[in-house]
C-alpha cells in the first residue's frame, strides 16, 4: 500500500492507497514541532479504525509547501514505515507535467500535483480552483502542462482578518446563506464571505477563459470545496481528493521508471 502525504499551510492530509483504491484519508493541523513519534501514534490509531495496518505500507510520497514539517514527515516514513519517501519537488523526481511559467522552481508542489491529477481525470484545458489557506486558480492546458494561475486569500483567512480588524464584528462560521441580503450582523457576514467568494470564483474564471480564448472545465478541490458544490454553474466538478490522486500518479510514474 502507498502512504500519500500532502502538507499544506493549515492542514496535512494522510491517505492510504491500495493500487487505485483510496482506503482512507485523515487530516491533522500542520505543526512544525510535531515529531515523527507523535505522527505515528496518531496514524496507527486511525489506520486501525479502518482495519488497516502500518506494516502493509510499502511506499510513500510527500508533497509539502511547509519546509518546517518535511524532516519529521520523511523520518516517519523511513523509521516507522521502512520506506524512503518520494518527495515532490526534489531533484530527480518526475512530475509528468511542465511548468510553463517564468520561474518554474517557484511553483508550489501542491499546484503541480493538482495539475497532474486534473489532467488525468478530466482532460482538455482546465482551471483547478483549490479552496485552502489560499484560494488558488491553476491553469492547465490540453497537454497537461501548468500554465500559471492566480493566488487569492483563502476564505478562512479573509474571515479571520475581518473579525480581527473590526472590533464589533463577532466570530462566525462559514455557511451558505439562503439570501444574499442579511438581516442581522451574523447573516450579513456569512453572506459577504460565502457569496463574495462565489463572485470571486465566477469573475476570475471568466477572465481566465477570456484571456485564454477557450472554454475550460472548472474543477473545485481542497478541504472547503464541498461547501461550494451546487452554488454556481461555473464549477463543473467538485473533487476533494484530487491532490491525493495526483500523489498516487506521481509515485507510480517514478516507481515505474
Image (tube, grey):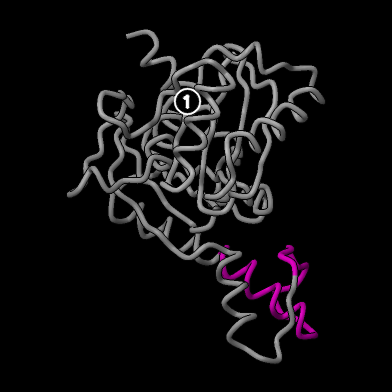
Q: Which residues are magenta?
A: 173-198
Seen as rendered, the residue at the extreme left is 102
Count of marks, rendered view: 1
| Vertical comparison of 181 with 153: above or below | below
**Rendering coords of residue 43 (x, y %):** 69, 31
| Residue at 60 percent of width and 41 percent of height | 238
Observer-nearest residue: 88 or 129?
88
Residue 191 in magenta? yes
| Residue at 60 percent of width and 13 percent of height | 1
| Residue at 63 percent of width and 16 percent of height | 21
| Vertical comparison of 26 with 52: above or below | below
Q: Quadrant of residue 46?
A: top right
**Rendering coords of residue 57 (x, y %):** 60, 14
Q: Is residue 103 left or right of residue 75?
A: left
Q: Quadrant of residue 27?
A: top right
Observer-nearest residue: 37 or 172?
37
Residue 161 in magenta? no
Q: Residue beneath label 1, please?
A: 61
Amino acid at each position: 500500500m502507498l502512504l500519500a502525504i500532502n502538507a499544506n499551510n493549515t492542514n496535512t492530509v494522510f491517505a492510504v492507497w491500495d493500487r487505485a483504491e483510496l482506503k482512507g484519508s485523515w487530516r491533522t493541523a500542520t505543526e512544525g514541532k510535531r515529531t515523527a513519534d507523535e505522527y505515528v501514534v496518531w496514524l496507527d490509531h486511525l489506520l486501525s479504525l479502518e482495519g488497516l495496518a502500518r506494516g502493509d505500507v510499502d511506499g510513500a510520497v510527500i508533497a509539502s509547501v511547509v519546509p518546517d514539517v518535511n524532516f519529521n514527515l520523511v523520518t516517519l516514513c523511513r523509521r516507522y514505515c521502512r520506506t524512503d519517501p518520494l518527495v515532490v519537488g526534489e531533484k530527480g523526481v518526475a512530475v509528468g507535467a511542465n511548468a510553463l511559467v517564468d520561474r518554474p522552481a517557484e511553483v508550489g508542489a501542491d499546484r503541480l500535483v493538482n495539475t497532474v491529477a486534473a489532467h488525468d481525470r478530466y482532460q482538455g484545458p482546465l482551471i483547478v480552483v483549490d479552496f485552502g489557506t489560499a484560494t488558488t486558480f491553476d491553469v492547465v492546458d490540453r497537454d497537461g502542462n501548468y500554465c500559471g494561475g492566480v493566488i487569492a486569500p483563502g476564505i478562512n483567512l479573509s474571515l479571520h482578518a475581518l473579525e480581527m480588524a473590526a472590533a464589533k464584528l463577532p466570530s462566525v462560521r462559514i455557511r451558505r446563506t439562503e439570501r444574499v441580503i442579511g438581516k442581522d450582523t451574523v447573516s450579513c457576514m456569512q453572506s459577504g464571505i460565502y457569496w463574495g467568494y462565489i463572485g470571486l470564483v465566477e469573475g476570475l474564471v471568466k477572465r481566465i477563459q477570456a484571456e485564454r480564448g477557450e472554454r475550460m472545465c472548472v474543477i473545485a478541490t481542497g478541504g472547503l470545496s464541498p461547501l461550494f458544490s451546487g452554488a454556481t454553474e461555473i464549477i463543473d466538478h467538485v473533487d476533494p481528493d484530487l491532490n491525493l490522486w495526483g500523489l498516487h500518479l506521481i509515485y507510480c510514474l517514478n516507481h515505474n521508471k
